[in-house]
Image (tube, grey):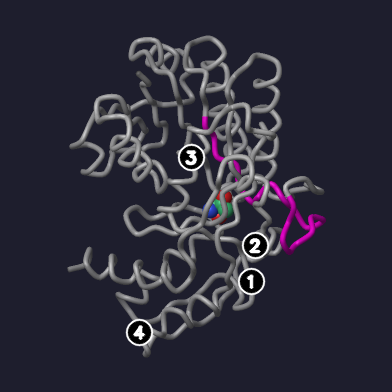
Amino acid sequence: MDNILVIGSSGQIGSELVMALRKIYGNDHVFATDIKQPTPEVQETGPFQILDVLDFKNLLHFIVRYKITQVYNLAAVLSGNAEKIPLQAWDINMKALMNTLEAARQSDAKKLFWPSSIAVFGPTTPRHNTPQLTVMEPNTVYGISKLAGERWGEYYHNRYGVDFRSVRYPGLISYKTEPGGGTTDYAVEIFFEAIEKAKYQCFLKEDTALPMMFMDDAIANTIRLMQADPKKLTHRSAYNMAGISFDPKGISEAIRKHIPEFEISYKPDFRQAIADSWPASIDDSVAQKDWGLTNTYDLEKMTKLMLEKIKEMKG
Ligand code: AKB
């Protein structure tokens, strides 16, 4: 029987991943942890504990005490925030990863998921349909930490047999918990503001296309990768994950089909340069072939659901 530890369970991915894992593995077998309070759903359905992944002794103690066999480590400072505090962001992102890699090496929690990002690519990477293996020269703090993390994950796999698995997440779109400090956050904010104010001022230019994915697909694919036969995994750094590709103009037109009076304006800030260094679209055929990555939401389907759910939530 697997016991699963989710680190960063109060964040945008963690709060939904915990619920999906509890459905599969049972409430009592999925331990949610974070330095922030959880969502009511996470709190009410199973174990939650405050745990700082930067504290190695406590982390290892937790893993041994609760006989953890799998870890999902989602703790990270995202791209926009990392540019404001470069050295701290580097320390936090790297230490959080290294602590879980070391804990995996020293315990039975050998299976480790850690999210990489499209931020591992940079301005010299082919921008369209970016291949799995290509030039990688990220020029953001977050991207540099993600690329270094991928290399460390593969190293711990090859050297110590840690069952490290990772994907390069595109921007993730969800309505339950808002993201914090990323460059793709606009694609979540826009839905909330469309409903609340029927207008949105975007911090990226209208034609800045980026790869994105609806959270349900991201969660299903993450669990699919973790359940995949290890013999089928040809990459132990991180797999490209494409989802759908759109720009602010495209998403605003999709919203206008439901809210005709919706207006968008553009005021690019420092995050424009980050977005400009990232791919506009990604090729994830290797992940499709190795472990069956699938995407079920297109822009229209996602827009309709996001607007319905946010309206419901706002009552
Ligand atoms: C960010 O914008 O920083 C993240 C990411 C693409 O990794 N959403």
| Residue 275: mark in rendering | 2
CA distance separating discs 2 and 1: 7 Å
> What separation in Å lies between label 3 and label 1 (alpha carbons)?
30 Å
Please name the amino acid that badge 2 sits on.
Ala
Looking at the rendered image, the disc whose residue lies closer to the viewer, 4 or 2, is: 4
Residue at image x 59%, y 27%? 230
Identify the amino acid type marked 1. Thr
Q: Mark 3 points at which residue?
A: 224
Frontmost of labels 3 and 1 is 3
Residue 126 forms part of the magenta stretch: yes
Disc 3 element: helix
Q: Would you call the spot at circle 1 few (<14 residues within 10 Å), some (14-19), or many (20 or more)?
A: some
> With respect to residue 62, does 243 lie above or below?
below
Q: In which quarter of the image is residue 277?
A: bottom right
Is residue 80 visible in this depiction of the protein? no
Q: In this view, does 134 lie to the left or right of 165?
A: right
Give the answer, above or below, for where 251 lies relative to 175.
Answer: below
Q: Which mark is residue 208?
A: 1
Question: Is residue 156 found inside the magenta-colored segment of the image?
Answer: no
| Residue hosting label 4 | 259
Q: Is mark 1 on a helix, strand or loop?
A: loop
Quadrant housing the C terminus: bottom left
User: Is label 4 or label 3 in front?
Assistant: 3
